[in-house]
């Protein structure tokens, strides 16, 4: 894996090479549902793992990293990987992905974190980056693919993962009942109405529309910027909404193959790109944040 990450830098002149793992469709939901689609829409680079712990970089990009004012920023212990990836995406650097095969289970400190803490750290880092690179991401209007290296093997080598979407849906319903008043500080009334409609109906038909989900994430980014409530409380209140998206995603793709899952994620990312003018407009005119 070290060779596969480094060779594009040494041999082909790339500046950043991130890993691309083959994972079970139910794994990495936070990256699939929020980090990757939003990163792609913001910076115009289709980098699947912008928060990866491992990567290879050129000396030119390393110089850029050392000049970045991110190392001592609040939350750097959790956000530095993402911030370095956005630094590369914001500059004139060649970016690639190396297919590293199946990601095996290894003990990791993050595995001991509850979902609320994980969302606070990961999504908080993403939202914080918006404030520091606003001049860059507001100019980006589309996205481009990064250069792939290698191919992800297909087959039945993935470990089985079981997730009960009904439990996720019940967590969302509980969250709606307990957090609706908090959400009204972040989300416009029409979104609250759409979320209310999700409260009823069987799990088999539970769907959270892509465009609705994209605007929810963007509204939370705006609420984070404006500090409409304490930032940690705001981010933790996002958890039931994320679980609603994850339940919807699992219900939709659980009987489909990997290629269909990839197409489904592509439609999600397209929705984030299509809704980006919504984020830009409300960022520039924040008094409209709750309209």
Image (cartoon, grey):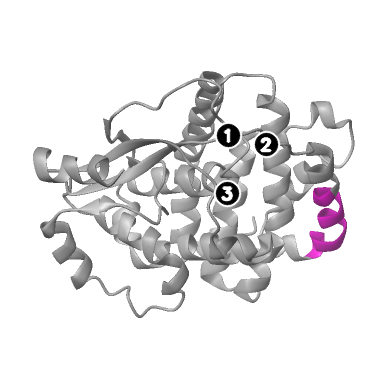
User: Which is nearer the N-term, disc 1 or disc 2?
Assistant: 1
Can you give x and y, in whole percent of width and height, for residue 258 in the image?
54, 22
Residue neighbourhood size for the residue with mark 1, other residues' Cα within 10 Å, grouped as few (<14), some (14–19), many (≥20): some
The residue at the point 19 percent across, 72 percent down is 67
| Separation of residues labelled 1 and 2 (CA atoms) | 7 Å
Q: Is residue 42 above or below residue 125?
A: above
Is label 2 in a helix, a strand or a loop?
A: loop
Is residue 97 rendered to the left or right of residue 129? left
Q: Which mark is residue 161?
A: 2
Q: Which residue is mark 3?
A: 30
**Residue 92 can be seen, yes or no:** yes
Q: CA distance from mark 1 to mark 3?
A: 13 Å
Q: Which residue is mark 1?
A: 24
Residue 113 sits in quarter: bottom right
Residue 144 is left or right of residue 126, and the answer is left
Residue 107 coordinates in the image, percent (x, y)? 55, 58
Label pair 1/2, CB-CB below 8 angstroms: yes
Q: Residue at x 86, y 46 (%)?
A: 170
Q: Residue at x 58, y 74 (%)?
A: 227
Q: Looking at the image, is mark 2 or mark 3 earlier in the sequence?
A: 3
For marks 1 and 3 on the same chain, the one whose residue lies earlier in the sequence: 1
* Quadrant (top left, top right, bottom left, bottom right) of the C terminus: bottom right
Q: Is residue 47 visible?
A: no
| Label 2 crowd bin: few (<14), some (14–19), many (20+), radius 10 Å | few
Q: Is residue 246 above or below residue 58?
A: above
Identify the secondary structure beneath mark 1.
loop
Q: Residue 1 at x, y = what percent?
A: 31, 43
**Per the image, is 175 magenta?**
yes
5 to the left or right of 269: left
């Amino acid at each position: 894996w070290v060779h596969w990450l480094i060779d594009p830098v040494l041999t082909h002149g790339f500046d950043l090479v991130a890993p691309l793992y083959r994972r079970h469709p139910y794994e990495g939901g936070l990256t699939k549902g929020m980090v990757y689609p939003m990163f792609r829409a913001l910076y115009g680079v289709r980098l699947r793992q912008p928060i990866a712990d491992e990567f290879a970089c050129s000396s030119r990009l390393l110089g850029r990293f050392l000049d970045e004012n991110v190392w001592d920023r609040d939350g750097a212990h959790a956000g530095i990987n993402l911030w370095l990836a956005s630094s590369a995406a914001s500059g004139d650097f060649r970016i690639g992905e190396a297919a590293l095969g199946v990601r095996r289970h290894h003990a990791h400190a993050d595995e001991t974190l509850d979902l609320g803490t994980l969302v606070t750290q990961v999504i908080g880092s993403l939202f914080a980056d918006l404030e520091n690179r606003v001049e860059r991401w507001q100019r980006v209007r589309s996205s481009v693919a990064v250069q792939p290296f290698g191919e992800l093997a297909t087959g039945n080598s993935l470990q089985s993962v079981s997730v009960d979407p009904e439990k996720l849906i019940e967590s969302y319903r509980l969250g709606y009942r307990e957090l609706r008043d908090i959400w009204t500080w972040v989300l416009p009334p029409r979104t609250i109405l759409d979320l209310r409609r999700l409260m009823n109906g069987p799990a088999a038909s539970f769907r959270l529309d892509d465009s609705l989900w994209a605007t929810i994430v963007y509204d939370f980014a705006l609420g984070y910027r404006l500090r409409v409530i304490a930032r940690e409380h705001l981010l933790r209140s996002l958890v039931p909404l994320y679980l609603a998206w994850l339940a919807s995603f699992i219900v939709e793709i659980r009987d489909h193959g990997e290629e269909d899952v990839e197409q489904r994620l592509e439609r999600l990312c397209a929705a984030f790109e299509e809704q980006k003018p919504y984020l830009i407009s409300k960022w520039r005119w924040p008094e409209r944040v709750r309209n």
